[in-house]
Image (cartoon, rainbow, N blue to C red):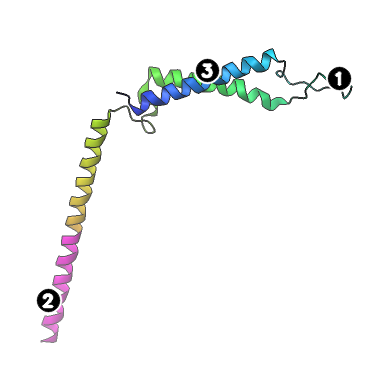
Amino acid sequence: MNTPAAAAWRILIGTGIGLLIVSGFLFSMELLPPVNCDSTDTNCVNTNVFGWLIPISGFLFTSIGIICWRKPELLSDLFPNTYEEERKKQHTESLLEEQLEDAKSSDAWSSLEKKLLVEKVTEEE
């Protein structure tokens, strides 16, 4: 059974490795580092510095994925490291707490209305 934290680090590592593989293809096809070509060379492709975003992103995703694998509590706000049953239990408990708070507030509201009506009736008499 997977937790959201485990799924997140797998996705991050997979994306990072995929981007690193694409970076390898870019280096092998000589699209990185950036090249400015003359108009006379037909085999040359103009590239710019934005091509470096792919290998940088690859290293970044891979390193964040490895860090999340080592320390799953690092991104616990975004990806909880709890199983489905625990998350369901926490969710039902929070719903019950909300319902109790709503019931208390509606009881308080009705008692306030009752007091106001009693005061209004006593004033009219």
Marks 1 and 3 close (CB-CB < 8 Å):
no
The residue shown at (47%, 24%) is 12
Label 3 CA crowd tier, 10 Å (few <14, some 14–19, many 20+): some
In the rendering, at what x and y percent does residue 91 appear? 25, 40
Q: In which quarter of the image is residue 109?
A: bottom left
Marks 2 and 1 close (CB-CB < 8 Å):
no
Prevailing secondary structure class for the magenta stretch in the rendered image: helix
In the rendering, at what x and y percent does residue 16 appear? 52, 21
Between label 2 and label 1, give the one nearer the viewer: 1
- Rounded to the nearest angstrom, the CA distance separating label 1 from label 3 is 34 Å
Specify which label sits upstream in the sequence, 3 or 2: 3
Classify residue 110 as left or right of residue 1.
left
Tag 2 residue: 118
Query: In this picture, which residue range is highlighted in magenta?
Result: 106-125
Label 2 sits on what residue type? Val
Tag 3 residue: 17
Specify which label sits upstream in the sequence, 1 or 3: 3
Tag 1 residue: 41
Foreground of the two, 90 or 10: 10
Q: Does the magenta stretch include residue 82?
A: no
Label 1 sits on what residue type? Asp
Label 3 sits on what residue type? Ile
Q: Does the magenta stretch include residue 121?
A: yes
Classify residue 84 as left or right of residue 125.
right
Please identify the quadrant where the N terminus is shown: top left
- Rounded to the nearest angstrom, the CA distance separating label 2 from label 1 is 95 Å
Label 1 CA crowd tier, 10 Å (few <14, some 14–19, many 20+): few
Up the image or down, 44 lies above or below 88; here it is above
